[in-house]
């Protein structure tokens, strides 16, 4: 067996995140490739939440519908994943779940183990999930010392008693897992891949945060909002080490304006939010456009409008990022598809924002930021944070009209000049003006057309995988990279390739010819109106037919199986 999908299902508050984090760390430490994703309801207690762990001998980074091993902590969670259970699914459950219910009435035949009973012997029922961790670890033949090392690192700070009781729970589970191997011949053997030394585990939010640090970020202002809060959390946890000022603002309006103020003072700032929070930031975004302030915005999408589905995934804010704000000014929008891309794109976002004095967006979504997998260690040796500001003199003009449209950006205190900025239309010195004959047209020209010209060298072409000369292409953008890649690997059709866009606005100039030269073009995205398909038509003139647009707007991510089924119906 090369790839095993484990799903843990429970109510909010039952410690499902503990099980996930421990198992992922154990599998990684034991030398396996691992991927984890989660889906959860917007509630603190109750409901049905799940987390999927894929353990493999090869790289895995996409959601699978298939469940090989299911560990339910409530009866309701079984029904929650009913459509994903097959005859081959092994269900391992706590005996106490079926104290008053016959499993056959649910059309299942679970393996019942005394998770809670063993936990109570240790002293508290809350250790039942750690007992389950030990059981699963033993089923995969992982040496017990690996799990013990992970648990020691996780719980040692909570005191000797808590640490020791968790270790007892884990060891108890390992014994049960070994018994399952011998009594039921239930054993899972995945060939451990070579060359795993130095691999790191990272989710999308962490990749954005670390990319920001690599880009020289030293200020974040944000109001917590799912699913973007992980960037704020990660930067806060590393703030002392990297000299980052962390501001949990009173609201998103304040967060945006503080970030603009930080850039004005010479800092490198990021705001991190979701769609509803960014809606409040749009006036500030226009302020950045008028004042020609650099700005980096991390926008983690979730279904809307309004509060929508706060904990689900979507690609519904592309138009929001491209067209938000009043008036006209230049911007750049990225949408990473891999953890590595998220890191490097965010690092580049700071460089581009600083160099061109424009807002740069890093557009993610819930599925992307909450999923993580192991990747090779990222080489940061050649990354530098180059500042674009200058030392000013007595004759400094903040909005000087230059040949290329890029005015020298000074910061207060660096040099002798006065750094004057204004949200009204202004002249070269930053004074308010209503000169509509010469000054206003010249300032609009430099903010819009000349900035667009300056952007061209920074635009990156889409990724084509696996066949550059394939006659048919499936277009996707952002987080759908990994699921499409694995689906294409599964199909193995030489006539079909993925064209993945991470540079989503403006588009690379090769985009139009690439689409026009293909025999058949399909698109897959997570919104109801085909926002990216419409953008392609607007910017290239190429129309993807409605019947070739595969749109999902349920709040669920695509699974590998669903993409394969969709492509088979298309004739591949």
Image (cartoon, rainbow, N blue to C red):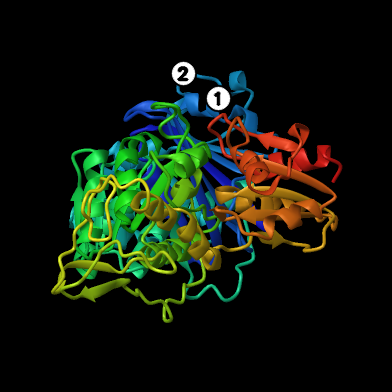
Q: Nearer the viewer, residue 49 or 443?
A: 443
Residue 462, horizontal then vertical, whole percent: 64, 59
Residue beneath disc 2: 100
Residue 106 shown left or right of residue 344 in the figure? right
The residue at the far bottom in this view is: 381
Q: Nearer the viewer, residue 399 or 183?
A: 399
The answer for how far apart the CA atoms under marks 2 and 1 are is 17 Å
Residue 274 appears in the figure: yes
Residue drawn where x is 46% and y is 77% of the image: 379
Q: Is residue 409 above or below residue 113?
A: below
User: Which mark, by number, is residue 79?
Assistant: 1
The answer to which image quadrant residue 159 occupies is bottom left
Residue 163 shown left or right of residue 484 in the figure? left
Residue 407, horizontal then vertical, whole percent: 34, 66
Q: Nearer the viewer, residue 483 or 47?
A: 483
Q: Nearer the viewer, mark 2 or mark 1?
A: 1
| Label whose residue precedes the other's in the sequence (2 or 1) | 1
Quarter of the image containing the N terminus?
bottom right
Residue drawn where x is 32% and y is 50% of the image: 290
Residue 26 appears in the figure: no
User: Which mark, by number, is residue 479?
Assistant: none
Label 1 CA crowd tier, 10 Å (few <14, some 14–19, many 20+): some
**Helix, strand or loop for disc 1:** helix
Residue drawn where x is 60% and y is 30% of the image: 528
Residue 250, horizontal then vertical, whole percent: 18, 39
Label 2 CA crowd tier, 10 Å (few <14, some 14–19, many 20+): few
Residue 444, horizontal then vertical, whole percent: 40, 51
């Amino acid at each position: 067996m090369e790839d095993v999908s484990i799903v843990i299902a429970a109510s909010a508050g039952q410690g499902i995140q503990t099980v996930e984090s421990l198992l992922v760390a154990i599998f990684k430490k034991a030398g396996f490739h691992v991927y984890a994703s989660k889906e959860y309801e917007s509630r603190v207690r109750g409901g049905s939440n799940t987390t999927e762990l894929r353990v493999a001998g090869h790289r895995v980074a996409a959601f699978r519908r298939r469940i090989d091993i299911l560990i339910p902590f409530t009866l309701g969670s079984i029904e929650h994943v009913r459509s994903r259970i097959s005859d081959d699914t092994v269900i391992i459950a706590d005996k106490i779940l079926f104290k008053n219910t016959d499993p056959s009435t649910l059309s299942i035949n679970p393996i019942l183990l005394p998770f809670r009973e063993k936990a109570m012997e240790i002293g508290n029922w809350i250790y039942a999930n750690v007992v389950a961790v030990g059981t699963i670890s033993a089923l995969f033949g992982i040496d017990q010392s690996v799990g013990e090392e992970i648990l020691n690192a996780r719980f040692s700070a909570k005191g000797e008693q808590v640490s020791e009781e968790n270790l007892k729970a884990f060891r108890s589970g390992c014994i049960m897992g070994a018994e399952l191997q011998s009594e039921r011949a239930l054993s899972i053997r995945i060939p451990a891949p070579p060359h795993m030394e130095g691999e790191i585990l990272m989710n999308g939010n962490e990749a954005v945060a670390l990319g920001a640090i690599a880009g020289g970020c030293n200020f974040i202002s944000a109001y917590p909002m799912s699913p973007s809060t992980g960037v704020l959390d990660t930067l806060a946890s590393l703030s002392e080490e990297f000299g980052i000022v962390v501001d949990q603002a009173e609201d998103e309006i304040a967060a945006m304006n503080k970030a603009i103020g930080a850039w004005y003072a010479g800092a490198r700032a990021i705001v991190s939010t979701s769609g509803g929070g960014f809606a409040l930031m749009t006036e500030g975004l226009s302020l950045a456009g008028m004042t020609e302030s650099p700005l980096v915005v991390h926008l983690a999408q979730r279904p809307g409008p309004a509060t929508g589905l706060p904990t689900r995934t979507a690609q519904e804010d592309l138009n929001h990022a491209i067209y938000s704000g009043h008036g006209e000014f230049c911007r750049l929008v990225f949408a990473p598809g891999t953890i590595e891309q998220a890191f490097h794109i965010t690092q580049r976002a700071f460089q581009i924002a600083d160099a061109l004095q424009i807002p740069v967006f890093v557009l993610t979504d819930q599925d992307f930021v909450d999923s993580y997998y192991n990747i090779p260690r990222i080489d940061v040796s050649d990354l530098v944070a180059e500042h674009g500001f200058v030392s000013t003199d007595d004759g400094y003009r903040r909005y000087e009209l230059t040949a290329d449209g890029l005015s020298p950006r000074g910061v207060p205190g660096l040099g002798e000049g006065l750094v004057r900025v204004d949200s009204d239309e202004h002249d070269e010195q930053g004074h308010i003006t209503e000169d509509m004959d010469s000054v206003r047209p010249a300032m609009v020209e430099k903010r819009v057309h000349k900035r667009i010209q300056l952007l061209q060298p920074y635009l990156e072409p889409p990724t084509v995988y696996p066949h550059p000369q394939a006659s048919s292409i499936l277009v996707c953008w952002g987080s759908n990279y990994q699921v499409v890649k694995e689906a294409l690997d599964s199909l193995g059709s030489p006539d079909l390739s993925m064209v993945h866009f991470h540079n989503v606005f403006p588009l690379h100039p090769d985009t139009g010819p690439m689409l026009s030269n293909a025999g058949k073009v399909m698109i897959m995205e997570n919104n109801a109106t085909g926002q990216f398909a419409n953008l392609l038509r607007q910017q290239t003139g190429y129309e993807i037919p409605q019947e070739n647009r595969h749109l999902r707007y349920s709040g669920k991510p695509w699974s590998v199986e669903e993409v394969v089924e969709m492509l088979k119906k298309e004739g591949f």
